Image (cartoon, grey):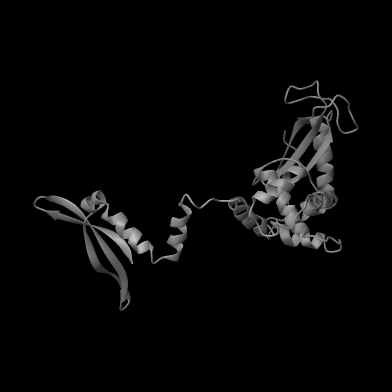
Amino acid sequence: MFLRRKRSAQKSGSYEYLQIVESVRDGGKVRQKVIGTLGRADKILASGKLDSLIKSLAKFSEHLKVVEASRSPEVEALSSREWGPALVFGRLWEKQGIPEIISGLARHRKFEFDVERACFALALQRLCAPGSDLQGSHWTTTVECPGFDGLALHHLYRTTSFLAEIREELEKQLSWRDFDLFSQDFDLVFIDTTSLYVYRDSETELRKRGYSRDRRGDLPQFVLCVVVNAHGWPVAWEIFPGNTADQRAMEQMVIRLRKRLQIHKVVIGA
C-alpha cells in the first residue's frame, strides 16, 4: 500500500490528487486498486492535514514510535559508533579471502585473541584514521564491528609483529589469489618510489639523509618502494635506506619479486 499522485485535467485547470493505492494480483497481472482519495494535493499539503494523518498512523507503527521518540528533547544519546566503514571494507576484506589466508598463516600460533579481527582493525584504522597502534586502540572503540570489543592495545602490538613476520607469504597468497586460467603471470607491473622524512637529527642504518621529494634534505628519511599490477592493486612494497637511488631500489625490488612471485623474464621500461 502506498501514496500516489493522480493528475486530473478539468476546465478550470490541471490538478493533482493524492490517492491511497494497493497493488493486487489479478490472475497473472498486478493491478493498482484505489483504496481512497485524500483530495487535492496542494490543499492537503497547505492545510497540514497530511502531517496530522501521518502522525495518527505512526501510533500504530513500532518502528516510527522509536524514530519519533528519538527526536524528543528528553532523549539524550550517551554514545554513538560508526558502522559504515566496517560494513563496506568488511565486504571487500571477505571478498579478497583475507580472513581465510590470515587464519591459515596463524594456524600454528597460540593467540589468545582473534588475530584476524585485529588485522582488520589495523587495516581499517589506517584507511579511515591513520595513526599509531595506540591511537588505533582508542579508535576501535568508536566503530561498530564484530570482534572489535575484545581487542586491547597489546593485541594490536602483537598483530603488528605477526604481520611483519608473514608479510612476504601474505603478499604472495593475495597476489596469486586473483589469477585464473587466462592470467597466470605478471605481464605488467608499475614500480615507484617516494621518500618519507622524519623529525630526527641522528641517522641510523635505515634512516638516512638523501634526495628528498619533499625538499627536506635536512632531515633523515626512508625510501618507500611500491609495486602495483596493471589494475592498480598493490602487489608488494619495501622500505629502503633514505639514500637509496631509484635504480638501486628497482633492482632490489625485481630480485625480491622473482623470489616471491616466481617471475622469470623481466623487461623494464623507464
* Residue that extends furthest to the front in the rendered view of this protein: 74
Q: How many marks?
A: 0
Q: Position of residue 134 (x, y in %)?
A: 77, 44
| Quadrant hosting residue 96 | bottom right
Q: Position of residue 172 (x, y in %)?
A: 78, 53
> Is 128 above or below relative to 5?
above
Front-most of residues 96 and 199: 199
> Is 268 above or below relative to 259?
above
* Residue that extends furthest to the left in the rendered view of this protein: 11
* Residue that extends furthest to the bottom in the rendered view of this protein: 27
Q: Residue at x 70, y 41 (%)?
A: 130
Quadrant containing the N terminus is bottom left
Q: Residue at x 84, y 39 (%)?
A: 252
Asked whether residue 103 appears in the rendered view, the answer is yes
| Quadrant hosting residue 194 | top right
Asked whether residue 182 appears in the rendered view, the answer is no
Q: Position of residue 92 (x, y in %)?
A: 63, 55
| Horizontal side of residue 189 vs 200, given as left or right | left
| Horizontal side of residue 15 vs 115, given as left or right | left
Front-most of residues 34 and 259: 34
Q: Residue at x 81, y 46 (%)?
A: 257
Front-most of residues 184 and 133: 133
Front-most of residues 136 and 232: 136
| Horizontal side of residue 267 vs 231, given as left or right | right
Quadrant containing the C terminus is top right
Q: Residue at x 67, y 60 (%)?
A: 146
| Quadrant hosting residue 208 | top right
Q: Position of residue 242 (x, y in %)?
A: 83, 30
